[in-house]
Image (cartoon, rainbow, N blue to C red):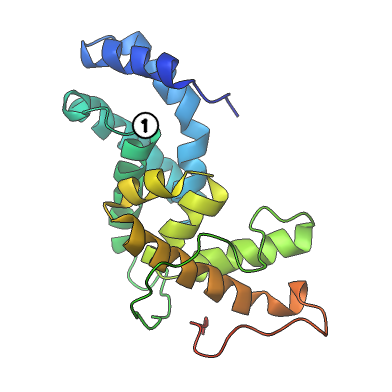
Amino acid sequence: MSELLSKSEEEALVSRAKSGDGTAYEALVRHNADRLYAVVLRFSATESDAEEATQEAFLRAWRSIGRFRGDARFFTWLYRIGVNEAKRILDRRPGADVVASTEERRIDDVADEAPHVDVQAEGTELREVLEQAIRRLPDKYRAAVVLRDVEGLSTAEAAEALGLREAAFKSRLHRGRMALRAAVAHYVLDDDDPLPEPGAPELS
């Protein structure tokens, strides 16, 4: 996977790309392709769908890069395009990725801390269980968990990517994390550890 660009390096490439420099845009693609593919894969039914969504996202981004204001990092803007493409492709596969709905209730001032679930966990079995649990989350919770806990965006960056206020983003992140904790509880909890709190959303 390519190393991430510094903010100044990225801004310079974006500026050149907005002026029509295809070479600069190719550099942006190289430095973001693996990361974008890893994200859209979690919103795709197959690897080929994820590849198609990634390619189409870069094409659409190139066509509209003149509208990129630079208020956020390039990947934050690209993420929205990529996930929208993945969802568009998934819509052509009715029933391919049906997920259960979870209750949506207001949460004020949720702490931005993961409740005993490390989505970067070591161990092949636990990583696989977590990956499947993430893919089964409803889109809005999945997006929050992927951006914040998998991709490592800050709360502000992730909220910007999803077009949410930070309080609303934290609410989604909290519910996504609690759903993950419930899904993998028997892998990560000891006998003396508490079970997920009553009322927390569960995966069906």
The image shows a total of numbered marks equal to: 1
Residue lying furthest right in this view? Answer: 191
Q: Position of residue 145 (x, y in %)?
A: 49, 58
Judging depth in this view, the residue of 158 and 23 nearest the camera is: 158
- In the image, residue 13 lies at what x, y percent? 36, 14
Relative height, residue 40 to residue 54 (above, below): below
Side of 121 where 114 appears, left or right: left
Q: Residue at x 49, y 51 (%)?
A: 148
Q: Amino acid at mark 1?
A: Arg
Q: Residue 101: percent from the left, percent from the top? A: 38, 80
Q: Quadrant of the N terminus?
A: top right
Q: Is residue 48 visible?
A: no
Instruction: Say if 100 sits above or below 120 in the image.
Output: below
Rendered location of residue 176, percent (x, y): 48, 69
Name the residue furthest front.
Answer: 109
Identified at 20% across, 27% down, the residue is: 63
Left or right of 2? Residue 10 is: left
Q: Nearer the viewer, residue 110 or 204?
A: 110
* Observer-nearest of 59 and 147: 147
Whether residue 99 is visible here, answered yes or no, is yes
Answer with left or right where residue 159 lies relative to residue 174.
left
Q: Is residue 189 above or below residue 44?
A: below
Q: Which residue is mark 1?
A: 73
Q: Residue most toward the bottom?
A: 198
Q: Which residue is rendered at x = 41% and y = 70% of the image?
A: 138
The quadrant holding residue 78 is top left
Q: Which element is circle 1 on? A: loop
Residue density around tag 1, few if under 14, some if 14–19, many if 20 or more, within 10 Å? some
Within the image, what quadrant is residue 89 found in? bottom left
